[in-house]
Image (spheres, rainbow, N blue to C red):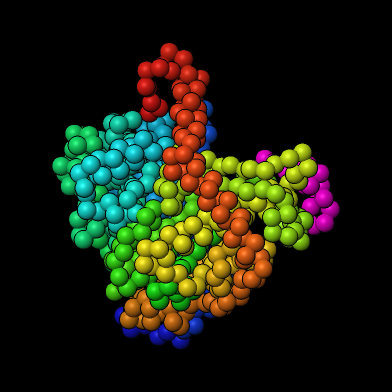
Amino acid sequence: MTVDPQRALTIGVDYGTLSGRAVVVRVADGAELGSAVHEYTHGVIDRELPGTGRQLPPDWALQVPSDYVDVLRSAVPAAIVAAGIDASDVVGIGTDFTACTMLPVTADGVPLCQLAEYADRPHAYVKLWKHHAAQPQADRINELARERGESWLPRYGGLISSEWEFAKGLQLLEEDPEIYAAAAHWVEAADWIIWQLTGTYVRNACTAGYKGIRQDGAYPSREFLAALNPDFAGFVDDKLEATIGQLGSRAGGLSAEAAAWTGLPVGVAVAVGNVDAHVTVPAGNALAPGQMVAIMGTSTCHVMNGRELREVPGMCGVVEGGISEGLFGYEAGQSGVGDIFGYFVGSGVPQDYYRRAQAAGQSVHELLTELSAGQQVGEHGLIALDWHSGNRSVLVDHELSGVIVGQTLTTRPEDVYRALIEATAFGARTIIETFGRSGVPVTELIISGGLTKNAMLMQIYADVTGLPLSIITSDQGPALGSAIHAAVAAGAYPDVAAAAEVMGRVERAVYQPVPADQQAYDELFAEYTLLHDYFGRGGNDVMHRLKAIQRRAHRSAADPAASNSGAVLV
């Protein structure tokens, strides 16, 4: 089909942690004509399985897959209405997802949690990216890979995350073998939603490479998997194998069922799935080596291209073509950023602050930002570790937890709030410096996400990292990136780089480091690094011991008779 870029439109759908959002984009220039958001009905399930009263252990995070389909039914038609466009002008749709988000399904793609016989089984549900209960399995994978000298391990910074496909799959096998056996496929949500749109199961090259340990066309061997657990030997062949789709390619045409959900024409091009972070790079026209894109939301993912293959300690992975064709795509990340700020506002701020914010017509976040913005660097006397949701990079250890040092009886909520923002900036600098030492220099930091609206936070990041900060001006960076990929899948542009050049939206060097503040933050960063290494590199293992105590206490509370038996929840 010949596409006229002057008239053609695409739709990008971004699946986040709490909601899905759709945006209608003009192919000719990347202009966003309308958007809509659908909040997931069930949100994040981390305490109790819906409708069962069944309590979940610590570090679990589940979702309900029907919430994802509801985004197609609700947000896409609403975005079309908001844009005031004729749906017949839409030539393609692209999607992106949080990763690594996994679900077990039947041979025809039905999630096991939707089957009556499995509705009360936690392992039948979606395991969200922030499900960290597979850390023991990840530890065993890492230990065995080091012992065997597996060549793929350095491609992931020397550590496989508990968030990823293999650790979660091994947990599924060992804690609920019946669900494992019933699953015909262990599917990334990024690929499952494309399956729902097209009726065809295609694995995307991004998640297969970063989260699925697929390097140089191969997964870990049967021998390696059997050494983890004899019943895990066939995991790749039985649960993962599928056609691999390249980024920007056409996964298929929109099915009649999905057309009815969305209001789009049958047969519209559907782009191969992608990860929310990686798909955002073209939205900022940031495909050149040295340009690191930080997608800041509940967590932060750091992605960038490089010309050469390098091994970066603690990175989430390097994959050839993982972001765009012809370059090596690098990924790192922080497990908690906006989540940390939200947690503190929800649990650590007195009601008086809520009343003050309400009287001023502000959010509590805005009030705390206003109260702390005038502080000198270091004035609050605090240093924090940003590990409330574990550490994704560079330590790759989700048993770690948050720390705040320096609190006194005069410490105020705004002091802690600023210290937590600074902690996340220090975590980002740790990643950037690790990349630089490994031969992957970062010359520009491009930020996407709602946190770009906080000028204090952005300036702190510039001062802490010493880098100019550019801003992706779209409020929906991942959705715009998905729309760009949809334009390529529909044939409007020859490749993602060409589409990004026209459709990307970025303002360069909006924030510059302030030399005096940069120097002051260097001193605080040295203190952060001391704490980082002390608690994160074996100086004091107290966080791991506390996690073990917590798990024993949970088992005891759930089943006193099984508290010392090693029983697990299924």
x, y percent for residue 517: 66, 65
Report whether 561 appears left or right of 453: left
Would you say residue 361 sits in the magenta stretch? yes
x, y percent for residue 94: 41, 66
Q: Viewer-proximal residue, 89 or 158?
A: 158
Q: Viewer-proximal residue, 262 or 222?
A: 222
Report whether 344 appears left or right of 96: right
x, y percent for residue 15: 47, 57
| Extreme residue toward the top, this view | 561
Image height of 75 relative to 120, above or below? below
Point 46% across, 58% down: residue: 431
Point 73% across, 60% down: residue: 376
Range shown magenta:
347-363
Point 62% across, 65% down: residue: 519
Q: In which quarter of the image is the N terminus?
A: bottom left
Image height of 170 relative to 78, above or below? above
Whether residue 349 is visible to the viewer of this picture, yes or no, is yes
**Main secondary-structure element of the magenta-colored stretch:** helix
Would you say residue 503 sits in the magenta stretch? no
Point 54% across, 45% down: residue: 531
x, y percent for residue 392: 44, 50
Image height of 121 relative to 411, above or below? above
